[in-house]
């Protein structure tokens, strides 16, 4: 009787182990594939492609195919929340990646309750707190840290007067409020002469740029996305304000800006967090290999951001699978292990997309540099600066 019980138990164990070895790993993500912020959606394609690259070249992660789902949130809060619920509840994703500041802020409590590792494409400081939000991670300096790097640059150049321009949404408004209330502007010896809010769907900002012209600032820092920046720089040129007066964040580094504005974009500066597409770095070797048999939708810095996010997410999943000896059948336990392994990532090589990263702080790298448009190309004008 004892022998039979042992035999049944061993058989069940072996069946479970074989099932685990054959299991796929589910990763789910959404971005603005269509909609008002689609110009910067390369970061969604980049992550999706990285996992496909692993499937095609390595058989997935530790021999397990990655079932990777890419969804379109269309920059609509209700749609993004619906997609999150699908990723967690229907797709049983072990890692989820989501888009907008508004959506991630709305979901942050739910993410902790669901205990699912989440990579945010928002870089707002309000969604970064390893203690209060232990399941949320991002891939670089926060918007606030980027803004302060820009203001430090102005102070070092001897500038004094600054105008902050931001979109009328959470992505635009919240980081500006954090920096303004922090007192950091005054600490740098700068004067905030105005704070201007613009419509996210603005088509004409002539009135706002005329207001800026009358204020005579030394720098206009823009916390908005590429579509709004295009309108700002276009209308600024009309009233005689040079692009060199303006500086933007990581989402203002886009080929669309020099392509659409031509020489009038020369001098515009932005904060760069991830290396350019086509840079002479090891990650491009893998991307070029992938491109031999696959179409790359967006060849820009945001694609590089997404590829790097895939590297980090996959590293955490790989370490969790190794520890478990396969894909755990208990999705809750698998998610918790992946979260722990994500936080434990140290000295992670991103193939040159960023400096080597450490995820104990949940944001990987805190380094960024300033780039300037010169002859239709973004050229670095500073070394990597640590925003900590």
Image (tube, helix red, strand yellow):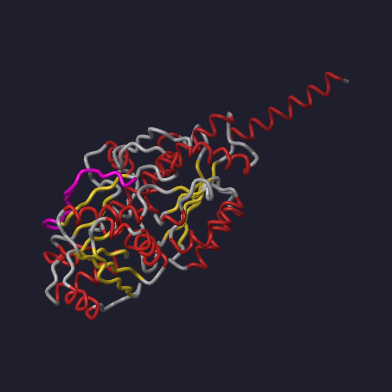
- Magenta highlight range: 374-388
Quadrant in which the N terminus is drawn: top right
In this rendering, the answer to whether 228 lies above or below 269 is: below
- Residue 278 appears anywhere in the view: yes
- Residue 55 appears anywhere in the view: no
In the drawing, does residue 274 fall left or right of residue 78?
left
User: Residue lying furthest right in this view?
Assistant: 1
User: Residue lying furthest top in this view?
Assistant: 3
Residue 246, image x, y percentages: 20, 64
The one nearer the camera, 364 or 353, is 364
Using the rendered view, name the quadrant where residue 363 is placed.
top left
In the drawing, does residue 375 fall left or right of residue 249?
left
The one nearer the camera, 51 or 143, is 143
- Please tell me whether residue 387 belongs to the stretch shown in magenta: yes
Using the rendered view, name the quadrant where residue 263 is placed.
bottom left
Q: Residue at x 50, y 38 (%)?
A: 317
Residue 304, image x, y percentages: 32, 47
Residue 184, image x, y percentages: 31, 57
The one nearer the camera, 376 or 245, is 245
In this rendering, the answer to whether 220 lies above or below 132 is: below
In the drawing, does residue 107 fall left or right of residue 364?
right
In this rendering, the answer to whether 4 lies above or below 52 is: above
- Please tell me whether residue 344 belongs to the stretch shown in magenta: no
Residue 198, image x, y percentages: 32, 74
Using the rendered view, name the quadrant where residue 19 is placed.
top right
Q: Residue at x 20, y 55 (%)?
A: 155
Q: Residue at x 20, y 58 (%)?
A: 269
Quadrant in which the C terminus is drawn: top left
In this rendering, the answer to whether 51 lies above or below 225 is: above
The one nearer the camera, 219 or 138, is 219
Q: How many marks?
A: 0
């Amino acid at each position: 009787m004892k022998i039979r019980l042992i035999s049944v138990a061993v058989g069940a164990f072996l069946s479970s182990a074989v099932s685990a070895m054959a299991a796929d790993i589910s990763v789910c993500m959404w971005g603005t594939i269509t909609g008002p912020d689609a110009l910067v959606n390369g970061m969604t394609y980049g992550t999706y492609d990285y996992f496909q690259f692993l499937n095609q070249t390595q058989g997935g992660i530790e021999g397990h195919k990655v079932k990777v789902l890419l969804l379109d949130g269309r920059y609509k809060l209700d749609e993004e929340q619906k997609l999150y619920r699908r990723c967690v509840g229907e797709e049983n994703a072990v890692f989820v990646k989501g888009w907008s500041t508004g959506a991630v802020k709305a979901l942050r409590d739910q993410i902790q309750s669901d205990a699912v590792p989440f990579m945010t494409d928002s870089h707002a400081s309000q969604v970064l707190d390893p203690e209060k939000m232990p399941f949320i991670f991002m891939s670089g300096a926060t918007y606030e840290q980027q803004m302060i790097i820009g203001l430090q640059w102005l102070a070092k150049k001897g500038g004094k007067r600054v105008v902050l321009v931001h979109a009328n949404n959470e992505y635009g408004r919240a980081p500006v409020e954090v920096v303004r209330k922090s007192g950091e502007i005054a600490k740098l010896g700068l004067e905030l002469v105005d704070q201007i809010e613009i419509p996210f769907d603005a088509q004409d900002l002539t009135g706002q740029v005329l207001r800026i012209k009358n204020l005579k600032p030394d720098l206009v820092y823009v916390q908005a996305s590429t579509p709004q920046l295009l309108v700002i720089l276009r209308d600024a040129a009309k009233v005689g304000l040079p692009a060199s007066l303006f500086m933007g964040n990581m989402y203002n580094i886009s080929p669309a800006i020099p392509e659409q504005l031509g020489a009038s974009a020369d001098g515009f500066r932005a904060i760069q967090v991830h290396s350019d597409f086509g840079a002479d770095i090891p990650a491009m070797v893998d991307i070029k290999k992938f491109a031999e048999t696959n179409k790359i939708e967006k060849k820009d810095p945001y694609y590089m951001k997404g590829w790097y996010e895939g590297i980090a997410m996959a590293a955490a999943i790989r370490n969790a699978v190794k520890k478990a000896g396969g894909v755990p059948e208990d999705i809750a336990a698998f998610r918790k292990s992946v979260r722990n392994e994500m936080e434990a990532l140290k000295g992670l090589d991103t193939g040159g997309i960023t400096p080597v990263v450490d995820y104990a702080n949940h944001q990987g790298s805190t380094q960024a540099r300033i780039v300037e448009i010169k002859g239709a190309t973004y050229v670095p004008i500073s070394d990597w600066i640590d925003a900590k």
